[in-house]
Amino acid sequence: MRQSSLNENEALTTALPSPEMVREQKIYRTFGLTDAEYARAVELLAREPNYVETGIFSVMWSEHCSYKSSRKVLRRFPTQGPQVLQGPGENAGIVDIGDGLAVAFKIESHNHPTAIEPYQGAATGVGGIIRDVFTMGARPIALLNSLRFGELDHAHTRYLFAESVAGIGGYGNCIGIPTVGGEVVFDNRYQQNPLVNAMCVGIMTHDQIATGSASGVGNPVLIVGARTGRDGIHGATFASAEDPHAKERSAVQVGDPFMEKLLLEACLELIATGQVVGIQDMGAAGLTSSSAEMASRAGSGLTLDVALVPCRETGMNPYEIMLSESQERMLVVMRQGAEEVAKKIFEKWDLQATVIGRVTDDGMLRVLEGGVVAAEIPVSALVDEAPLLDRLALRPAYLDELREDAPVLAQPSDFVAELAELLARPTIASKQWVYDQYDSMVRTETFVRPGSDAAVVGIPGTKKAIALVTDGNGRQVYLDPYEGGLRAVAEAARNLVCSGARPLAVTDCLNYGNPEKPEVFYQFERSVDGLATACEALQTPVISGNVSLYNESNGVDIYPTPVIGMVGLIEDRERIVTSEWKMPGDEIYVVGALSHALLAGVGGSEYLALRQPDASLKYRLPTFDLEQEVRLQQYLLACAQQGLLQSAHDVSDGGLLVTFAESAITGGRGAEVQFDFAVQREGRAIESDELLSLFFGEGVSLVVITAKPESAGALSRLANEHQVALTRVGVVASTPFLRVSVDRQLYVHADIWQLQAAWRGAIASWMKH
Amino acid sequence: MKCAVIQFPGSNCDFDAVKAIEATIAQPVDLVWHTATDLSQYDFIVVPGGFSYGDYLRAGAIARFAAVMKEVERAAADGRFVLGICNGFQVLTEAGLLPGALRRNESLQFRCELTELVVANAATAFTRHYQEGERIVIPIAHGEGNYYADEQTLRRLQTNGQIVFRYAQGCNPNGSIDDIAGIVNERGNVLGMMPHPERAIHSRLGSEDGTKVFTSILQVWRETHAAIQS
């Protein structure tokens, strides 16, 4: 019977090529299916798939939807913990924050669309991640992002950068969710392949958790929100293509944040009725993946009639409707008889909610067009039987060619000029030009705005707040995938403890090059090992994430760039710590192994990249001490919770002097800093490379804290308890001068307002070009 | 004093306005949907910020046709208090309740920052608790806050003391004519301003300088209310 209806359908949709044509003309290849995958689809169906079915297979089995290259490796992540309410596999992960409250969050990439159409690419990235969060029943309360571009001396980079920022702002500002934090890195390696990763965080009570599961035979399936158009067809496939420019422009979607605002309010109102069985965002591969995934989670089947789908234009065929990636749409399964509840709520918000099918128990995804079968595929064939690849991993030769010794750099004659130059490097410089374009304050819960180590957002009705961060360092992961992976997680967590928060869990966005290259796959595998090890050690399980592969152009791959999104909990909002120096007389300490910092060198640092760009990829990264890192973070958290910290700022891009300068500039306070290594060095004078390592190295985990003089005893007692090195190095000054000396020799005497001009104006002055 | 905060599709500072009223003056406040046809019970009406109707066509241009706007006009005509913040200011100019228009920022970019303002008229119902010339810090968050009025209108605003807030010298973030950040109507009961006083009600948010907008209105309302009763 099925077969006969399929034949009828072929007669009706003569415009679409026949199954024989799909095979003979190898049309499946243009959809991205390999010959072997096509053969597998034939085997699973026990017949040749028709055109629509071939399209459905191709998107479901695309890298983007099936994670066929990465799935096995991702199993290495720790995903459990007492705080985890929902781990990976849903639209977003959820962690418990006590008091019956929970936080849902996820990060996602929108790299390929941004390379083509930066405004819409970035905007729809934000739109998609917001949907992932409110789909879970959570009200979105904060957005973050992580961006990578080429160098700003390139006009096209400035265009991509300006438009991406405008797109992110355009979407978040309109929908009324504050963009509270993020990071931007500029490096030639991202010239052709910019990275735009967007993270959304939502709040909910435990009993509001909704999932994307289509259960209950006979329950109605509704499509809600925007109408379906021809935009974004095959976007999921195109996300995995090497050269997105060669693909059709229609594969980039256009966002409508106003529509999404209405959809958000309507969906939260609908979920609150308790009549929703399952709800799922329509992102990549649109109706196809949302329906297949919802049925797969419930072990059910779905019958949908595409003729019932409200369309933007006439004459759309089943293939186009099933593969459209039109934005601002959701698939909802309601309890039987509750269709009217949905319709009424959506009407209030001037939106459509249309029943397009029912849940079945036969495990089939059945697509009808006006009652006639247009496609019929077992859900398990699309999801469980999706290809799972064992990609070849080969250690890249360059890793064995890295030099063990420290790069030799001449000692600068003027450290202030050196520092000012570093501060004006776009990767280090103030990102005010960026975040002033984002509404970071709407909802009036943003206690720490962009620019500090982590953003802090209050939880209404409680004393609590959450700290949020995104972090990554592609160059370091390139130099040592495993160690770089450790560092990425450690730094994200360190940023959270620097704000006084206990890290809870991770969402990761794994951006890599072409996984078909064994060297790239090695980078992927090894860095995941590093990330997983650090997540384990810091007790921050991975609860959601996204993988973006094929970030390559003309044979050049991006740096392996895992971006870590992390959420931490501050029990008492009075205990929030920020990075700027506060009061003259506050004492300055360095937490961490300062003596190691003398010796670790400048391998992998921004300073080396500034001074010797060619050498920056030739020297090894200093070894990372994970155990030490755990102790350091526990120490800082204890200090913060006891209210001992006036400020805390971790040493990252640019090294120790940059850290001092940032706290000085943002606090409007100078400082008198004196390092004394004479005793431990038995009088031997400090060498030039040790000085550079101390001032500009990024190899050792260090945190600069300030505290009131009366806290000195408590700080050092806790340091002993936690076996952490704590060195008092100076005092916050009442003058606007930052003075740094080592063994009584003065190296830095800088006017902080001059440093501020270099730091604050750098990006804006590039963007005037 | 009964307060209403209007909700259009796309409003997104509606809850912030409610929170601010509750936190600063603890008066009863309702969220009122754009289809409402009776606001007669409200003494103070806030048209909040956001992107009503997606700001399609022009910021505020569609919202002015919403059913509730007839009632807002009636409230203004009755002498009750109307406060338009950001998008609300744009809606009030589109509705003709305030003169002038708000154009795109000179930078052509959205701007969100704490801005320094000067209280240009402390004698209005909305600014009673400020000092004339007082410098205050209130955040802005807008892409179309560049106030414009023709010369004649501008002169009238200046002579009548209708300019209530100005951006401090050198702090004009959007190119507004005469550094205008907020104006009242001639009668003095309708205020439109681009900065967000509802976002400046606690030091944790960076400033509490917006509080006095709300406390001023309450005091004036209490005085007039007492006068009516006696």
Image: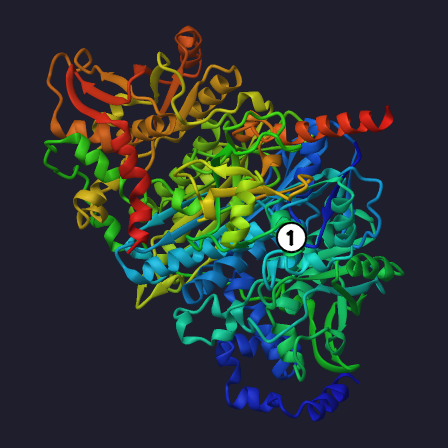
Q: Is residue A242 above or below residue A144?
A: below
- Color theme of the render: rainbow
Residue A187 coordinates in the image, percent (x, y): 30, 52
A225 displayed left or right of A610: right
Q: Quarter of the image holding residue A321?
A: bottom right
Q: Is residue A613 visible?
A: yes
Q: Which residue is mark 1?
A: B91
Q: Quarter of the image holding residue A313?
A: bottom right
Dot 1, how many residues are within 10 Å of its Cα: few (below 14), some (14-19), or many (20+)? many
Residue sitting nearer the eye, B221 or A493: B221
Q: Which kind of residue does numbered mark 1 sit on?
A: Val
Q: Is residue A704 above or below residue B98?
A: above
Residue B173 coordinates in the image, percent (x, y): 44, 44
Quarter containing the C terminus of chain A: bottom left
Identify the residue at image location x=12%, y=28%: A688
Q: Is residue A543 visible?
A: no
